[in-house]
């Protein structure tokens, strides 16, 4: 059994509309490997974040 250390930081994501639905839909694609130990969680979160930013920009949303 692999144990995870306590989180060191909190990430807040404020999404509405299509980006929120997209975020939920692709979560496992980007973070699934982190739960099996094949990828660092921070790498999965960074890739997920970038995918969401790219998607939102493509849909015409302003990304801060």
Image: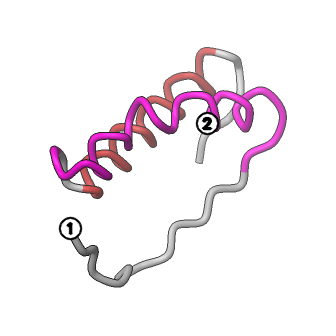
Whether the magenta-drawn stretch holds residue 25 is answered as yes
Helix, strand or loop under label 2: helix
Image-quadrant location for residue 22? top right
Closest to the observer: 33 or 59? Answer: 33
Badge 1 crowding class, 10 Å Cα cut-off, few under 14, some 14 to 19, many 20 or more, is few
Examine the rendered structure and indicate whether residue 5 appears above or below residue 53: below
Going 20% across and 67% down the picture, which residue do you hit? 2
Range drawn in magenta: 15-38
Q: Is residue 17 part of the magenta span, yes or no?
A: yes
Q: Residue furthest left?
A: 38
Quickly name the residue at label 2: 23
Position of 47 compared to 21: left or right? left
Please name the colour scheme applied to the rendered image. secondary structure
Label 2 vs label 1, nearer the camera: 1
* Residue at (20, 54) in percent of width and height: 40
Residue ID at (73%, 46%)? 15
The quarter holding residue 56 reads top right
Q: Which residue is mark 1?
A: 2
Q: Where 63 falls versus 40 (above or below)?
A: above
How crowded is the residue under tag 2: few (<14 C-alpha within 10 Å), some, or many (20+)? Answer: some
Q: Which secondary structure, mark 1? A: loop
Q: Position of residue 18 (x, y in %)?
A: 77, 26
């Amino acid at each position: 059994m692999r144990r995870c250390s306590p989180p060191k930081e909190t990430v807040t994501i404020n999404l509405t509309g299509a980006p929120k639905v997209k975020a939920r839909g692709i979560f496992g694609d980007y973070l699934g490997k982190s739960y099996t130990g094949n990828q660092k969680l921070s790498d999965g979160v960074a890739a997920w974040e970038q995918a969401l930013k790219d998607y939102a920009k493509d849909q015409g949303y302003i990304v801060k």
